[in-house]
Image: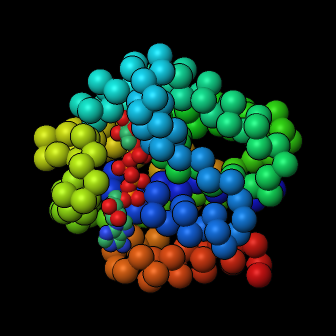
Amino acid sequence: MFNLIIFGPPGSGKGTQSKKITEKYNIKHISTGDILRNEVKQQTELGMKAQKLMEKGELVPDELLIKILHSVMDKNKETAGFIFDGFPRTLVQAKELDKLMEQIDDSIDLVISLEVPDDEVVSRLLKRAEIEGRKDDNRITIGNRLNVYKEQTSPLLDYYAEANKLEKVDGVGTVDEIFNSICKVIDKYLMI
Ligand code: B4P
């Protein structure tokens, strides 16, 4: 299996690039943001718990995310690999993901970090707000999401750098330019 994490601040293009990676490399895309938004839409018990936190730009508790992940991985045992988009976001989640991978005799192969400056992500997310009207894409919540990213999520960069799994990619440019840079990193790893 080939297992990849796509990492970066909110609005860095994780979701956008994951869709293209999934198509090209035929691996299963797991977006915890999409899963949570779907739960909110259906107003499930989990969705109702997550909604308030997401609208404030806070993280949903680790134990809920770990349960979700466990269940999605379990339903996709036949896949050629996974692309994790928006997960892990805390050290607890990263360690739990390592454990889940171990249970299936596998591991995370590569972590691609999309490097995008704050002013660029803010302008992308404000633009998306006009098009899609996502409740967490407003100036105040975006500011909080960036703070949460810096405090709780960015320390994972050290975790994966120490494990020799981290590759940084410039996340500024056209979607296709960035995708080409990502493919070069993946192909080098897979030695295509
Ligand atoms: P996510 O859905 O993961 O939201 P995100 O970080 O904003 O990234 P997203 O994938 O949507 O955006 P993208 O960068 O592709 O999470 C939302 C919330 O869910 C979190 O705040 C949290 O509350 C909760 N959550 C999710 N996972 C969790 C976890 N593991 N633990 C706890 N809580 C969790 O794209 C952004 C915009 O940029 C798009 O409009 C896109 O079109 C545009 N764009 C992309 N590439 C571009 C480019 N190259 N140039 C210009 N624009 C571009």
| Viewer-proximal residue among 166 and 25 | 25
127 sits to left or right of 87: left
Q: State the image coordinates of residue 15 (x, y, percent, origin top left).
A: 46, 57
Which residue is the extreme one toward the left?
139
Residue 79 vs residue 45: left or right? right
In this view, 133 is above or below 51:
below
Quarter of the rendering occupied by the N terminus = bottom right
From this view, report whether residue 172 is shown above or below residue 152: below
**Considering the image in quadrants, where does the C terminus appear?**
bottom right
Locate residue 61: give its quadrant: top left
Q: Position of residue 18 (x, y in %)?
A: 54, 61
Horizontal side, residue 117 vs residue 98: left or right:
left
Q: Tag count in the figure?
A: 0
**In the image: residue 114, left or right of residue 119:** right
Residue shown at 24% from the left, 31% from the top: 56
The residue depicted at 34 percent of the width and 27 percent of the height is 51
Residue at the farthest front position: 42
- Residue 30: x, y in percent? 60, 47
Asked if 38 appears above or below 119 in the picture, the reply is above
Question: Is residue 158 visible to the viewer in this orientation of the structure?
Answer: no
Percent x, y for residue 155?
43, 43
Between 161 and 138, the one nearer to me in the picture: 138
User: Looking at the image, can residue 75 be seen?
Assistant: yes
The residue shown at (68%, 37%) is: 72
Q: How is the image coloured?
A: rainbow
Q: Residue at x 69, y 77 (%)?
A: 187
